[in-house]
Amino acid sequence: MNTVAPLWLWITFVVIVLVSLFVDFVVLKKQGSHAVGVKEAINWSIVWVALSFLFNGLFWWAIKDTTGNAELANTKSLEFLTGYLIEKSLAVDNIFVFLMIFTYFAVPSEFQKRVLMIGIIGAIVLRTIMILIGGWLLAEFHWVLYVFGAFLLLTGIKMWWAAGKEQSLDDNPALKLLRRILPVSKNYDGENFWTVENGKKIATPLMMVICLVALTDVIFAVDSIPAIFAITSDPFIVLTSNVFAILGLRAMYFLLAAVAAKFHLLPYGLAVILVFIGSKMMLIDIYKIPVAVSLGVVVGILAITMIWSVKTAPKEATHG
């Protein structure tokens, strides 16, 4: 697995991630349990997006400085941007599932932040492992690209048919299994995952939530990792674009949760994006779609879907 990124940029990336997690877990923890408002979510979303773009600028400079090739730097930074937008887009579907889980378990808004913070750690670890495995597979077996492409194509079609339909966790096999394994309290005990009832240590509903969030991380990692390999095979770009998209997931959740109803058509747009990416992978040996075209398609689909969602969103009832 070859990469154009110098060693010092790998180290810089790791430091940025560790500092970001420190801010989330240590600094923000001092705020205590509180409901994250739209204004706070917007501010943090801007911070994470700005950090991602600044890193991409540093990435461009590092390649140009190391290789002296400005064209290569442009191409690689464009690959990062495209990968970042694709992962950010697919994270939207992840967020809708989180919203469904939190609603089903009636998780108080002030407890949701901690669950998401732990979920982000799990997502980073899982995706790093899967990126390393995926990169090795592609390096050793080129035909795996076609498997990834077909998987994304089928996933996109499945997502299209599932979009707009009422989702429920009642028949979720993972939830049924968890309930058989773990005795669960009916009530929350603050942000604790365990509580004591009748002298016995049992799980709180928050433990069930964190288990389902972890399972969601695994499922969406399986979807999103092949998607980024359709853009680039450089492990540095694959990993960094994924991680930067994940770092802003918590703020993005609280932002989208507040306006989810207005973007009700987004799942259809995400389905089309997956079908496009899957098709791109399966055609790679016949025609390689330029990165700039891929970026334009992804941005265009998202823009059209969001605008269309706002125009067709059901109007709120007015009270006279």
Image (tube, grey):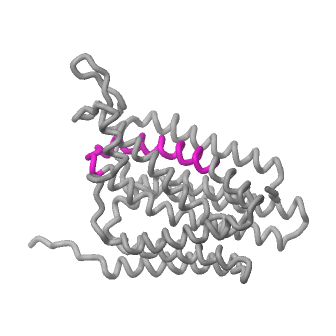
Q: Residue at x 69, y 44 (%)?
A: 14
- Side of 216 relative to 166 (left or right): right
> Which quadrant of the rendered structure holds the C terminus?
bottom left
Q: Nearer the viewer, residue 283 or 87?
A: 283
Extent of the magenta region: 103-128
Q: Nearer the viewer, residue 26 or 10?
A: 10
Q: Confirm whether the magenta stretch covers residue 52.
A: no
Q: Where does residue 79 sit, x and y in percent of width and height?
A: 70, 68
The residue sitting at the right extreme is 68
- Side of 220 relative to 257 (left or right): right
Q: Residue at x 62, y 75 (%)?
A: 295
138 in relation to 129, above or below: below
Q: Where does residue 302 sit, x and y in percent of width and height?
A: 49, 75
Q: Main secondary structure of the magenta part?
A: helix
Q: Residue at x 67, y 67 (%)?
A: 145
Q: Residue at x 56, y 62 (%)?
A: 87
Q: Where does residue 70 sit, x and y in percent of width and height?
A: 85, 71
Q: Where does residue 123 sit, x and y in percent of width and height?
A: 54, 48
Q: Nearer the viewer, residue 267 or 76?
A: 267
Number of on-image labels: 0
- Side of 95 relative to 149 (left or right): left
16 in relation to 53, above or below: above
